[in-house]
Image (cartoon, helix red, strand yellow):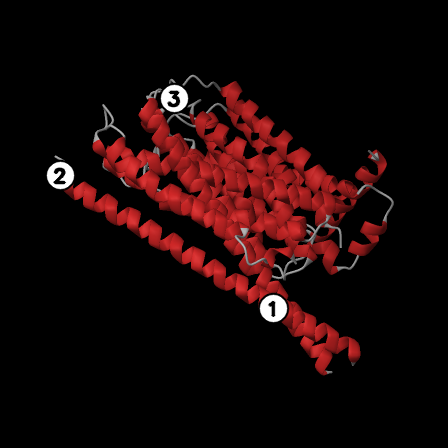
Amino acid sequence: MNGRALAALVRKDILIELRGREVVPSMAVFVGAAFVLFRFGLGGANLAGGARAATGMLWVAIVFTSLLGLARAFAHERESRVWDGLLAAPVDRALLWLARACSTCLFLIAVQAVALPVFWLFFLQEGPAPSYPVLVAAVLLADVGIACLGSLLAGLASSVRAREVLLPALYLPFAIPVVLAAVRVTTDTISPQTSGFGTLERLGFLALYDTVFALLGWALFEYVVED
Amino acid sequence: MIDESAVRSVAAVYGLAWIVTLAYVVILNAKLGRLERQLDELAGLLERRGGDA
Amino acid sequence: MAHTAARLDRATAAALVAAVLMPAAVALIFFYVPSDADQGYSQRIFYFHVPIALTTYTLFAWGAVNAARYLWTGREALDLQSYVPMHLGVIFGSLTLITGSIWAHISWGTWWDWGSRELNTFLIIFLFYCAYFMLRFSVEPGERRSRYSAVYALLGVGLIPLSVLAVRLAQDALHPIVFRSNGINMDGSMFLTFLVALAAMLSLAVSMYQVEMRGKRIDERLAQLRRLAREAAA
């Protein structure tokens, strides 16, 4: 595992984003607009379904926002023709995937650092609220899983013509388990339901999800870029 | 309650439908086999012709 | 090209086996097996639904195994041998959803039971395989499509146990579990009927597989012939 190469690749992604400011601001605006839509959709004055519906909406928004960020993954490299140069470099191909997963995860965290306070402002001020440490933990764990799997699928879709349509279709079935676990873990802290499964089990599931797709991504990425 | 004779008729028709479907599959298969043999012949002819040309 | 023998080939043999087993299963299901104590006559759909579901899982597993073999060896034939079981898996999967929905309607009066573990897990997996087909249709035929299909198929292998877990974790323990009542405590005649039905569905799947593979091979031969003809004419 070439740590220096990894750091260099992640640094490159971050620098490109800092200079170009393409992805993160758009994601932030998108998630803010989504929250406004949800708020109005659920009933402006009185929130239908309360904080529990809102938490569900939060996770849906997170999934779609991350799709936005992933859509641009690898597009930059392919467009500016540095792709072949990267492939020719004497590093394990999987490192490209890992670097992309790291930078995607960082971008997601950056967007959520803005999105979560906005979410609190819009949705959680009235009525009971979920436990914030649990919510943050769930968000972080979900980010890792989304970034790992999403980077693999983005690499796959980036060489296909219909990539804007294809990536969401490929990705969304995998988002379902994340949303299932994450929504339950956060809403259960609002009003616990007797189900024999605690917060720790559900957070543990998210960690398991991350592990499985980190391993699969690491194993399979070289087959995606074999050109 | 369940009318036994009606069920018998339904089951008989259902079983018959399956037999007919699978007979269709068997016949289809035989035709496909003939088609494959003809394709093999054609391929052989073409390859020989391509070799002579 | 040994598969063009005039004797009984694999596809015909499988179809004949299915032709015997399917009507036998129908006869057993409708005439032989006793009605369920709790759910009555309509419980018999179980003998269709569960074998179809098990066949679906078998087909997906077979497709995934061949996908892994393809990535490992690079043999082009394995791509079709992975794709066709997936394709059949989606067909049988649709049937599983339909029979499950009918059963839910019979038992509960609703066409879909959002509380059912099995149905929800199956739904996630079904969506995944529809996405697999989207992928397959978006890439031009060739080595890249085979590779991408195999990679995505193997991702599905990771998704399936995670979906089972996720659905399980998302449920309330107090929700009644509909399909549990037909677990392992079946008596002899029920078990026999179940096995025959399972064998019938599997043999049906095998014969469909053989026929579809044959059709696809013929497509490839035709394409090859067209190429040869063009070369000979030129």
- Residue in view at x 55 percent, y 28 percent: A138
- Residue in view at x 51 percent, y 46 percent: C129
Q: Name the residue carrying label 3.
A: C184
> What chain does badge 3 belong to?
C
Q: Name the residue carrying label 1.
A: B39
Which quarter of the figure has residue C199? top left
Type of the residue with mark 2:
Asp
* Up/down of C131 relative to C139, above or below: above
Q: Position of residue C131 (x, y in %)?
A: 52, 49
Q: Residue furthest bottom?
A: C234
* Up/down of A142 relative to A68, above or below: above
Between circles 2 and 3, the one closer to the viewer is 2
Type of the residue with mark 3:
Ile
* Mark 3 burial class by Cα count in 10 Å: few <14, some 14-19, many 20+: few
Q: Which mark is residue C212?
A: none
Same subunit, tags 1 and 3: no
* Mark 2 burial class by Cα count in 10 Å: few <14, some 14-19, many 20+: few
> What chain does badge 1 belong to?
B
Q: Quadrant of the N terminus of chain A?
A: top right
Q: Name the residue carrying label 2.
A: B3
- Residue in view at x 26 percent, y 38 percent: C105
Q: Position of residue A196 (x, y in %)?
A: 43, 16
Q: Secondary structure at mark 1?
A: helix
Q: Position of residue A134 (x, y in %)?
A: 52, 24
